[in-house]
Image (tube, coloured by chain):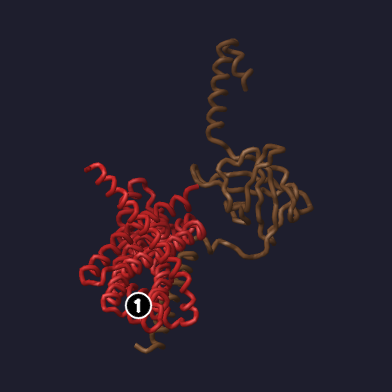
Chain colours: A red, B brown
Amino acid sequence: MSITQSIERLGRTVRVSVSQIGNFTLFFLRLLSQSGIVLRRPRLLTQQVHFIGNHSLLIIVVSGLFVGFVLGLQGYYTLNRYGSEEALGLLVALSLTRELGPVVTALLFAGRAGTSLTAEIGLMKAGEQLAAMEVMAVDPVRRVLAPRLWGGIIAMPVLAAVFSMVGIIGGWVVGVLLIGVDAGAFWSQMQDGVDVWKDVMNGVLKSVVFGVAVTLIALFEGWQAKPTPEGVARATTRTVVTGSLAVLGLDFVLTALMFGD
Amino acid sequence: MSNGKTDFWVGLFVLIGAMAIVFLALRAGNMSSFSFGPKYQLTAKFDNIGGLKVRAPVKSAGVVVGRVTSIRFDDKTYQAVVSLEIEKGYDFPSDSSVKILTAGLLGEQYLGIEAGGEDTNLQNGQSIRFTQSAIILESLISQFLYSTADKQGGADKSSPAAAPSANK
């Protein structure tokens, strides 16, 4: 009996996870098909960009600055052993534009903006506001979710670019102003080694993909949340966990695809 | 908050993002070394291009005058065909030669053009005839080893007095 039971349990796990993937895909397609509203009523979009983007700017700038400081210090420590401190600018710029900018921003974004999206949607569901919209013949996917998705997709690359820029400035402050690396070599090595398309634009592309993934996961979790305080709490936690893992996994895949050659 | 104010802040936010990308492209990246002026195309055939890459600089007397635009393999002559774009305004005599050089000891590879003495200049689409392949460190080392071995082998066979003149 126990063997049949465990096979049954395995089957149920597979069925549930497959249907969850299906739900997620359907949710994504439904959101995309309802996205025309952001062009017809751009006010809804700007409100969401303001809520998701502008309010995340401070945490992004501060963390970018400190990541840049630390990269400057640690990079100098390592490069100094090989007598090539001038490459500090290159190290800071490449680490930020290729990896840390998009990834750290996406992780912070999941924590700062993703959670608030999930909690907002979850509470709207718990308070039956979404049901009330449907009664009034307003599609909540279109009116509530689609502007939030596009707000996230627009905000994320902007935040990642700001993060990288502030980080490079932070590395410059520590490397050039505090430690005394030659300023000319710092910038010229950076400009020699950082390619606009291969490094900067691939970083921007990464941040767009992360923006889609994190926002979509946040909205999906809020949409699927049990309409109870506990359900919303669980959904918010899942947003951070799933969102962060998705970002790290996608980062590996994207890095392998973009920089594989 | 009124709608106008929200719009203002969102506009500012997007503007800051655009500024950051421009900063990354110009200040951190190599965008400022791109030139968008008119160019002309040349090709050159090499027996071996070593580690030359697309977008590698083309320099003459150390000054960047163009970029490598494509590298492909010609299966008729078994040579690498390198296309390069030279900025209009930099003309080179038609008997100029092109070499694959390395920046520093282990740096990246680039093309160096050395001007010839001909009166006519290279035109768009023409091919540079005189080329020198990349120096491959492995073949250099093996050449050195073989020549050393030859020298020593030769020295053993012939008489010691005749050996230096015979090998040099």
Residue that lies at the very extreme toward the right in this rendered image: B120
Label 1, residues with CA under 10 Å away: few <14, some 14-19, many ≥20: many
Residue drawn where x is 71% and y is 42% of the image = B130
Of A134 and B127, nearer the camera is: A134
Which picture quadrant has residue A162? Answer: bottom left
Is B160 on the left-hand or right-hand side of A52?
Answer: right
Identify whether A180 is placed above or below A49: above
Which picture quadrant has residue A16? Answer: bottom left
Chain letter behind tag 1: A
Residue drawn where x is 26% and y is 44% of the image = A4
Of B115 and A78, nearer the camera is: A78
- Residue A82: image location, x then y, percent: 36, 46
Residue A181 appears in the figure: no
Residue drawn where x is 45% and y is 56% of the image = A189
Residue A115 appears in the figure: yes
At label 1, the amino acid type is Phe
Of A147 and A96, nearer the camera is: A147
Of A64 and A134, nearer the camera is: A134
**Where the N terminus of chain A falls, by quadrant?**
top left
- Residue A14: image location, x then y, percent: 34, 51
- Residue B148: image location, x then y, percent: 54, 22
Q: Which residue is mark 1?
A: A51
- Residue B28: image location, x then y, percent: 45, 62
User: How many numbered tags mark residues here?
Assistant: 1
Circle 1: element type: helix
Residue drawn where x is 30% and y is 64% of the image = A239
Identify whether B106 is placed above or below A202: above
